[in-house]
Amino acid sequence: MEEEKFDVIIVGAGPAGSTAAFLLARAGLEVLLIEKGITPGSKNMFGGRMYSHALHKIMPNFWEEAPVERPVVKEILTFMNGSQSVSMDFQDVHWGTPPYHSFTLLRADFDAWLAEKAEEAGAMVACGIRVDELLIENGRIVGIQAGEDRMLADVVIAADGVNSLIAQKAGLCKKFSPKQVATGAKQVIQLSEETISQRFKLSGNEGVAQLFVGDCTKGMHGGGFLYTNKSTISLGLVVSAEALQHNQYKIIDLIEDLKENPHIAPLLEGGEVVEYSAHLVPEAGLNMMPQIFGDGILVAGDAAGFVLNLGYIVRGVDFAIASGEAAAKTVMSAKVNNNFSKQGLSKYQQFLKEGFVMNDLETYRQAPQFMANPRMFKAYPQLVTGLMSKLFTVDGSPPVRLMGKILGQMKQSKIGLTQLAVDGLRGARLL
Amino acid sequence: MMAGIWIFAENREQTLELINAGWNLADELGVNLVAFALTEQLAQEYIKYGTDEVLLLPPLTQEQPLESYVPVIVEAARNADPDVFFIGATKRGKEMATRIAASLNTGLATECNAFALDQEKKLLVMERMIYGGKAVQKVVCTTRPQMATIPARTFELAPLQEAKEGKIIRLTAAPPSPVKIINRNSKVQEAVDITEAKIIVSVGRGVEKKEDIALAQELASILGGTVGCSRPIAEELHWLPEEVYMGISGKKVKPDLYIGLGVSGQIQHITGIRDSKIILAINRDENAPIFDAADYGIVGDLYDVVPNLIKAFSNVLKI
Amino acid sequence: MKILTCFKWVNDEADIKVAANSHELIFDRVGYKISDYDRNAIEEAVRLQEQHGGSVAVVTVGAPAAKQSLKDALSRGPGKACFINDPSFVNLEPSQTIAILADALSKQEYDLIICGEGSSDLYAQQVGPGLAEKLGIPCATNVNKLTYNEGNKEIIAERKLDDCVEVVTVPLPALVTVLPDINAPRIPTLKQVLGAAKKPVENVTLDALGQNYEPRLQTISVLGATMERRHLKFGTEPADIKVIIDALLKEGILA
């Protein structure tokens, strides 16, 4: 039986894969989008928020039909240390109006919608199918094999997530080491829409994104997050896989502790856990990026390690979408000359640079290393909370002026002035 | 036009249970209690257990399955217009009830495990399990007769009423059914009735191979219990006989102690064991739904835990 | 052989949550699926067709949203689908489904109709035999082995009943309901999934049926079945086991 041939086969119907499929199908190419989950998104997970700019560029005003949860207007960064916490609360009410800076989402709904857009544009979507092998001829990727079925294509786009089997089979990279990934786990907790809006002091359908750093990760590299969806809260942790392996903690226990944390528990009061999920998260930025193109193959999204975690900002979905767009542009330009060799696909780097993906990752290349600084997760949170405590406590003890308070706290937290200055400068430069 | 509470069941025991179920109802509604019987002897007996009238079904030939009675029953019902019709929820009974209901253009509540009479509307509010047993649905049938199939042992047997008198009406022969029996093999009845067991050790998909059931058997024997399982173990893998699978479509058990080994806890199975006094579950997966249904849950590898349990129980029971 | 096979698009009961206080069911994040045992019915139909030739059409009754089920059903082998739909076809009770199917199928030609033993949501186990009765064709239920005797235009069905295994012959046209142990439904391959999109779908609307389908069973309430349990969790240490055994002793469970 003759093998069916497509222009492009895309493996993985997440944001990267579906975006590429949508654009390529819209341009008239024969696209096959293959997803191993029963529905797109069923195997996908993230903390909770997507920055709108990337999708808005491709599908203007997508929020009018996409299943989004709440537009985020409030960003909170919280340092936690036992009974004390310090939060910086930033709000921009304009973010609650178009073009909406960012949205919280539920992946099962959003990814399914995005894949449907690709299908409407003309892509063939096959769910519940796992790609087992790449078809390689003379070192060139010519298609895929799923079970007994072989499908040919001019180019395969590997958009199959962190630890991309496809990129590995193409020889573009090895499995990520525990150093390069984090384990993200979260619980989705049900509360009513009004309760959420009230507790977080939000108007209408607005949302909050909150990041936690400090004892929630018990000194390990990582942090906690909380995102408000329409009628649920996504609460979770991202912790370095290496650190988890090294210590005896199970992330599920850490999340239970997080829920009971006195600074968080009141926010969740009366809520019921409706979902629990965990997933690996690429953490190492550009330094973990595999070869992202080869003969007949492109790699996009988490599969290419396109995630940026600066602590105060975490971005994955917008990168995935933008890289899907760049991949689509690459294929379209390669099609002009019918050259899908590594050389023909090399424009991928350029398209990624033109967008923001490469630039942003390049700018923050050193960030993951800096963020791995252990002081970030214990000493500095302690410093901040300790200092604020000194500032606000009135208990009859001898008064100390501000400078004295600061120096005193640094001594207590065992942080020298120089150390603080060095870290501060580095942080300001790298993050 | 109240013409009676009607009863049909495939065997004597279930007929007596349904006579019990219908007795008070017939009394409250002031109508006759009518039962179908397969033999003259049973007909006489049913009267002594409380029926006012028995409809004696004609004998069938060897090649006619029981379901051949459907047209006979339908005709009798059309003529008499009963108010309520209970049928024993055996596999055949459920098929027959459905076909009878379809022919009479009325509704049918499948596997009704409880009912109450709405005195005012003279409607039975019938309860049954849905969503694998996750929920209880209450329904009423707004057409005549109100029909329900009722599982065995939902009601106790009716008490004997030696002095009771009643009428036996012989029904005409059943038309030849297009479905013909060419063979019938009786099932070998299992020695132990798991529905009576006080202690049950249950095998789920977490048990890796058939030989490992010996582990469950060892644990059961220390405790003086019986081995059972979830549906796939019996029906798909055939590791244990079907008589011992517990669930919404299998056996409903009420032991003092149920121990699940590698049982994931799907709702269909839980429905069969929900009346257990104590549920102890051992499963490797901490997110397995069985832990939501258990009193005591051990998150761990059953291959480690069970030998330790056997040792510990042996010590305590001084075996 | 012209075979029809019926399936129901149901919510996945594992996703249904029960509200803690009111015991009401929460369907918010419920996924949908082809009812488990109907997959066996579809598989059996396709197997018979692969053995004896002919055609298989898959039939379902549902609301328009159920359209997404057709791809899944068609990827399992049937050559075409018959989608009987109307927005009012939500929460139908068995007698309605039976009446709708009977009207729709009475105009069709078929040798055999294969249904599942019962749907995973309501498990009323009525549509199969009820449909046969309305269509005036013989039926065999609880079948776990099916053979087609082409010469006599009949099927030989092994029925697994409570107290026996009964083997019957049933002249065609007929209907059977099959048990899940009759076969293992195939996992559609990529080509089969892609092929599904190209297969024809016949849309049958309420207008075409020309009737109202009033329910005979009215649902008064649906509430979560509660079960109080202690939910105590333990590890595998000897200390944990001791706690459990002590508790069982205290309860008087162990003789």
Image (cartoon, helix red, strand yellow):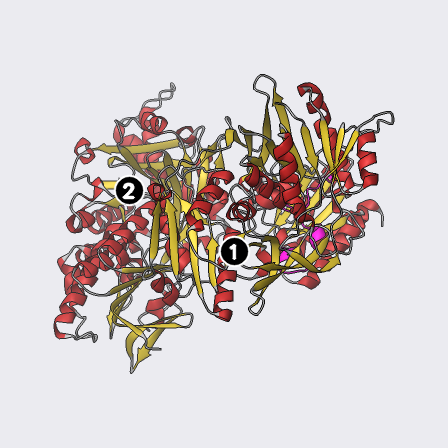
Q: Nearer the viewer, residue A299 or B79?
A: B79
Q: Is residue A408 left or right of residue A54?
A: right
Q: Residue at x 42, y 31 (%)?
A: A268
Q: Is residue B162 left or right of residue B265?
A: right
Residue A192, placed above or below residue B300? above
Element class at badge 2: loop
Measured Cα–Cα span from mark 1 to mark 2:
39 Å
Residue B129 placement: quadrant: top right
Judged from this view, the residue extending furthest toward the top is: B120
Label 2 Cα crowd, 10 Å radius (few <14 / some 14-19 / many 20+): some
Q: Residue at x 27, y 26 (%)?
A: A401
Asked if the magenta segment contains residue C150, the reply would be: no
Q: Chain of mark 1?
A: C
Residue to which mark 1 is pinned? C114
Residue to which mark 2 is pinned? A67
Q: Nearer the viewer, residue C236 or C4?
A: C4
Q: Residue B185: image x %, image y %?
A: 74, 59
Q: Amino acid at mark 2?
A: Pro
Residue A264, placed above or below residue B200? above
Majority SS type along the magenta span: loop
Element class at badge 1: strand
Q: Nearer the viewer, residue A409 or A259?
A: A259
Q: Amino acid at mark 1?
A: Ile
Circle 1 or circle 2, nearest the eye: 1
Q: Residue at x 76, y 49 (%)?
A: B226
Residue A97 placement: quadrant: top left
Q: Residue at x 48, y 69 (%)?
A: C50
Which stretch is magenta?
B233-256
Label 1 Cα crowd, 10 Å radius (few <14 / some 14-19 / many 20+): many
Q: Are marks 1 and 2 on the same chain?
A: no
